Amino acid sequence: MINEIKVKSILNKHKKRDDWFLDDYTVNQYSGCSLNCIYYYVRGSKYGANLAKKLCVKINAPELLDKELKRRAEKEEYGIIALSSSTEPYMPIEEKFNLTRRILEIILKYRFPVEIATKSKLVLRDLDLLWQVDKSAILPEDLKSRLNRGVIISFSISTLDIKLAKILESRAPSPLERLETLKKCKEKGFLVGVNYIPVLPFLSDSEDQIDEMIKTAKEYGADFVFVGGLTLFGKEPYDSKILYYQFLENYYPDLLSKYKSLYRIFFAPTKEYQMILNKRAERNCEKYGIKIGFCSKIN
């Protein structure tokens, strides 16, 4: 079921710029996600097991954004806009509602830079607009020496294992399809990368797996990668933690106790685990000559 709603605001200004993706603003023109990934961190029991049944389309988002960006532009409060930060901007319903494209037209109008994280090849439809944004966007003064692009496109991948991806991301394009789409964006001249987020403990995080993931990103033309751990939230029946543990019980029951130990205190893995993951990412990025993040230097 798709709910068309009107909202009071659409542009969210961070108190502090995001350390990884460098965005100062976020825009979420949809809520819920029809890709229905089991690990999706925004999951909650209010959405139920099938997020596709709770999709909301914020039909007045373009009009609101026009007003809000006009005010920001007049004050020269430029910053990268993350589109979308908590859902997929190119879900299948985008072909009907065209909200993402209309949002991009307004971003172009006011010359804001944009960062898009997606799993979908539908982003190819908007490369004409994105190219104009890339060339005309005004970066914040403190980013101009670090980043000379107005558009950043990244593709989210948790595993290169096709069978595992099919279970966890049943309605998403395959990892190979995402990489092929990345390659096409790169061939058009865009700054592109892979978000290996979330990497799955004991399933896609070994030294060999991280090596293969970063090597593959490089082969397909990625300019950068991010590598981040899995977060698991909640105690209710349809929260991500409970659903993910059910997945483990069904497919990898021997891993369940390891996960409960790893997530025994917090929604994120232990600091020790994250340090090991970061070191694996750093070693392999150096090995293949690819940056971690948009602005880091290749060692």
Image (cartoon, rainbow, N blue to C red):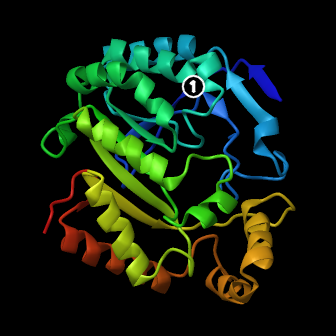
Q: Is residue 167 left or right of residue 214?
A: right
Q: Residue at x 81, y 67 (%)?
A: 235
Tell me: residue 29, above or below residue 243: above
Q: Residue at x 65, y 58 (%)?
A: 166
Residue 131, image x and y in percent? 28, 24
Q: Nearer the viewer, residue 200 or 20?
A: 200
Tell me: residue 274, above or below residue 147: below
Tell me: residue 249, above or below residue 3: below
Tell me: residue 223, above or below residue 102: below
Q: Is residue 141 visible?
A: yes
Q: Is residue 39 visible?
A: no
Q: Is residue 56 left or right of residue 290?
A: right
Residue 80, image x and y in percent? 35, 35
Q: Which residue is mark 1?
A: 10
Q: Is residue 52 left or right of residue 176?
A: right
Instruction: Name which residue type carries label 1.
Output: Ile
For residue 106, what is the image quadrant? Answer: top left
For residue 266, what is the image quadrant? Answer: bottom right
